[in-house]
Image (tube, rainbow, N blue to C red):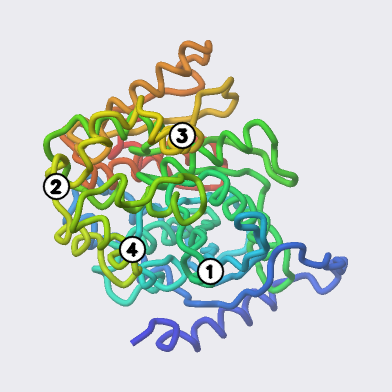
C-alpha cells in the first residue's frame, strides 16, 4: 500500500493550514514561462514520522548513523518531472525526481548523481517510493529522504532511463551526460518557482554522487565551477569512489588477472560504439562467446549480477589478446584510447570546496584512482583547503556508500544556516 493513500487526508489538512497562514496581502508574482521544465506531478509524500521511523531502523543496523533521525525536521514531497535537454545534438525529453521539504522556507539545492544502473526499473523516477523501512537501503530513497533535513534534492534519471528509454544510456560519456544534469538543475529551479510549491530555493547549490555518480558529479563540478549557472551559487561538492581517469581504470583492469565487476567495461565500450565514440567492434575487443552476447545482455531488464554471471571475471578470457597487450599503444585501438581520455575528468584550477571519498578496500574502483586524481590538482597548485581526499577505512566499494553519505551530509550542513540540527550528526561522523 502506498503511503500517499494512507495520509492523503493529513496532507489536505496540512495544505489548508499552510494556506491559511499565508498573508493574503502578499504581492502576486508573475510566473515566468518554463524554459526546460515540461511536466511535474506529485509522486509521493512521506511524513516526518515515517522518515524518522525508517532512519531509526537504519540506525539500529548501522551504528554510524546514530543521531540522524533527530535531525529530521519535516516530511518530504517527491515530484516526478520531465524536462527538455539534448542528446547527441538532438532534443530529448529527460526525467528525474525532486524531493522537497514539506515545510515552507528557503532551502539549498543538492544535485545528487546516482551510481551505475542497468535496469529500467531502478531509475530514480521509477524507484522512489518508500513502502517500508527496508527501502532505506535504496540509494534513491535515502537521498530523497535527506530533504527532511533541509535540502531540496534533485536526482536525474540520466539519458536512457525514465522518459528517455528510447536511447541507450551513455555510460560514462561526458558530452551525452552533462546536458541532462545541467538541465535537471534548471528544471528544478523552474519547478520550485511555482506558486503551489511552499518551499523555495535559497540559491545555494551542492553537488554529490558516488561511483558513476562520483564521476558525473566531478564532470558537473568542472562545468559549473568554470561556467557558473544563473540563479545559483555553487557552494561545495562531494565525490565518492568515481572512475575519474578512465584510461587509468582501463590499464588497472587489464593488468589484473581477475576483476569482480566484469560488466563495467562491456557496458562502457558498447555504449561508446553505439554512440560513435569508437570504431572498434565488440569482437575486436572481447572474445567469444562474450562479444556477441553483449548487446543482448544490456537490455536493461537483466541485472548487473546476471550480466556478470554471463561473462567471466578472468580478464585473459574476457578480452581479446590484442586488446590486452596493446590497447594503450596499438593503432588498432586508437579510437578507444581517445574516447577513454576524452571522457576522463582532468584536473583544473578548482575554486569550489570539494571532498573526495574512497574506501581503502575498494577493488571495483581502486583508491589509487582518487589518490592520483588528487595529485593532479596538487600539481596545479590547488591546495587542501579547496580539495582533499578522505580515506574510508576497511571499506570496499559497496561498504563505502553509507560512510560517504554521512560524512558528505555532515560537511554540507556546516555551510548552511537553515536552522538545521547538525551537532548530533557531527558527534557520529568525524569531519
Could you tell me how far apart the alpha carbons at marks 1 and 4 are, in whole angstroms?
19 Å
Q: Secondary structure at mark 2?
A: loop
Q: Secondary structure at mark 4?
A: helix
Q: Would residue 174 be found to the left or right of residue 398 on screen?
A: right
The residue drawn where x is 23% and y is 47% is: 398
Location of mark 4 (residue) = 295
Could you tell me how far apart the alpha carbons at marks 3 and 4 are, in whole angstroms?
24 Å
Location of mark 2 (residue) = 313
Q: Would residue 412 be found to the left or right of residue 417 on screen?
A: left
Location of mark 1 (residue) = 164
Q: Dividing the picture into quarters, in which one does residue 139 lie?
A: bottom left
The residue drawn where x is 60% and y is 24% is: 351
x then y, percent, for residue 381 = 53, 11
Q: The C terminus is located in which quarter?
A: top left
Of residues 332 and 419, the one drawn nearer to the viewer in this rendering? 332
x then y, percent, for residue 93 = 62, 68
Could you tell me how far apart the alpha carbons at marks 3 and 1 are, in whole angstroms?
24 Å
Task: Single out the mark in the foreground, 3 or 2.
Answer: 2
Indicate which disc, 3 or 1, sits on the residue closer to the N terminus.
1
Location of mark 3 (residue) = 344
Indicate which disc, 3 or 2, sits on the residue closer to the N terminus.
2
The residue drawn where x is 48% and y is 51% is: 112
Indicate which disc, 2 or 1, sits on the residue closer to the N terminus.
1
| Looking at the image, residue 127 lies above or below residue 421 | below
Task: Single out the mark in the foreground, 2 or 1.
Answer: 2
Could you tell me how far apart the alpha carbons at marks 2 and 4 are, in whole angstroms?
18 Å
Amino acid at each position: 500500500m502506498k503511503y500517499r493513500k494512507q495520509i492523503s487526508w493529513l496532507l489536505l489538512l496540512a495544505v489548508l493550514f499552510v494556506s491559511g497562514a499565508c498573508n493574503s496581502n502578499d504581492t502576486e508574482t508573475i510566473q515566468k514561462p518554463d524554459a526546460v521544465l515540461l511536466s511535474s506531478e506529485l509522486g509521493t509524500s512521506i511524513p516526518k514520522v515515517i522518515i524518522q521511523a525508517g532512519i531509526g531502523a537504519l540506525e539500529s543496523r548501522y551504528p554510524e548513523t546514530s543521531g540522524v533521525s533527530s535531525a529530521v525536521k519535516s516530511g518530504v514531497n517527491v515530484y516526478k518531472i520531465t524536462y527538455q535537454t539534448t542528446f547527441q545534438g538532438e532534443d530529448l525529453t529527460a526525467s528525474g525526481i525532486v524531493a522537497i521539504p514539506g515545510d515552507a522556507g528557503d532551502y539549498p539545492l543538492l544535485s545528487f548523481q546516482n551510481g551505475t544502473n542497468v535496469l529500467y526499473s531502478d531509475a530514480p523516477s521509477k524507484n522512489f517510493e518508500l513502502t517500508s523501512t527496508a527501502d532505506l537501503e535504496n540509494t534513491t530513497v535515502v537521498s530523497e529522504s535527506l530533504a527532511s533535513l533541509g535540502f531540496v534534492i534533485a536526482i536525474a534519471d540520466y539519458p536512457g532511463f525514465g522518459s528517455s528509454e528510447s536511447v541507450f544510456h551513455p555510460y560514462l560519456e561526458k558530452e551525452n551526460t552533462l546536458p541532462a544534469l545541467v538541465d535537471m538543475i534548471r528544471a528544478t529551479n523552474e519547478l520550485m518557482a511555482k506558486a503551489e510549491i511552499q518551499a523555495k530555493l535559497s540559491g545555494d547549490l551542492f553537488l554529490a554522487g558516488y561511483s558513476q555518480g562520483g564521476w558525473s558529479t566531478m564532470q558537473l563540478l568542472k562545468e559549473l565551477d568554470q561556467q557558473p549557472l544563473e540563479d545559483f551559487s555553487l557552494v561545495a561538492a562531494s565525490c565518492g569512489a568515481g572512475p575519474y581517469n578512465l584510461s587509468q581504470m582501463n590499464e588497472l583492469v587489464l593488468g589484473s588477472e581477475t576483476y569482480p565487476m566484469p560488466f563495467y567495461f562491456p557496458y562502457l565500450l558498447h555504449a561508446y560504439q553505439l554512440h560513435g565514440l569508437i570504431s572498434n567492434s565488440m569482437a575486436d575487443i572481447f572474445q567469444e562467446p562474450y562479444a556477441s552476447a553483449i548487446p543482448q545482455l544490456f537490455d536493461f531488464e537483466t541485472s548487473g549480477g546476471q550480466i556478470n554471471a554471463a561473462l567471466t571475471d578472468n580478464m585473459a578470457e574476457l578480452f581479446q589478446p590484442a586488446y590486452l597487450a596493446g590497447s594503450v599503444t596499438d593503432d588498432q585501438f586508437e579510437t578507444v584510447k581517445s574516447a577513454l581520455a576524452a571522457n576522463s575528468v582532468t584536473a583544473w584550477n578548482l575554486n569550489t570546496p570539494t571532498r573526495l571519498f574512497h574506501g581503502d578496500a575498494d577493488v571495483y574502483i581502486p583508491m589509487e584512482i582518487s589518490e592520483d586524481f588528487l595529485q593532479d590538482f596538487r600539481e596545479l597548485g590547488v591546495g587542501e583547503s579547496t580539495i582533499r581526499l578522505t580515506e574510508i577505512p576497511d571499506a570496499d566499494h559497496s561498504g563505502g556508500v553509507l560512510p560517504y553519505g554521512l560524512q558528505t551530509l555532515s560537511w554540507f550542513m556546516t555551510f548552511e544556516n537553515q536552522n538545521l540540527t547538525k551537532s548530533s550528526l557531527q558527534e557520529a561522523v568525524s569531519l
